[in-house]
Amino acid sequence: MSDQHEPLAGDLLVILRHAPHGSSWLREGLDVALVAAAFGTDVSLLFMGEGVTALVEGQASGALGQKGTAPTLEMLEMYDIETLWVEAEALTRFGLTADELMLAPRALEAGAIAEAVQNHPRVLTF
């Protein structure tokens, strides 16, 4: 039996904090997650702040034809990215429920988010 604390999941935690439209931050974060997973890295995703809006079902393209992120999010399982978290406070702030999300992330409170960040050896924020 080991006394060491096991990480929550994964080698890399990618934190997505931007809305799906208006900038390329969310798309770039998802691209990094997919590339890392393609090279065998165990990736966890955490949607925080405006990033939770990327999970809303039925998104259309943005201004000037900016593509939605739904097709990319649908590929996560194919890349074995199965650890998905969402900031519980952000869900409340945006008036969202789990039923309105296209994926089934686990909602984390602030304390669990801090633990997740602390337990991943590499964290990238987009």
Image (cartoon, rainbow, N blue to C red):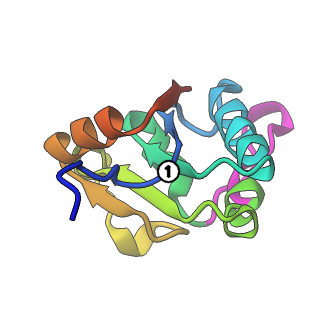
Front residue (pair 77, 95): 77
Q: Which residue is mark 1?
A: 10
In reply to whether residue 61 is colored magenta, the answer given is yes
Residue 125, given in percent of the width and then of the height, sits at 51, 26
Amino acid under label 1?
Answer: Gly
Query: What residue range appears in magenta?
Result: 58-70
The quadrant in which the N terminus is found is bottom left
The quadrant in which the C terminus is found is top right
Front residue (pair 3, 39): 3
Q: Residue at x 72, y 31 (%)?
A: 28
Q: Dot 1, crowdedness within 10 Å: few (<14), some or many (≥20)?
A: some
Front residue (pair 101, 14): 14
In reply to whether residue 37 is colored magenta, the answer given is no
Predominant secondary structure in magenta?
loop
Residue 36, given in percent of the width and then of the height, sits at 72, 42
In the depicted structure, whether residue 82 falls above or below residue 92: below
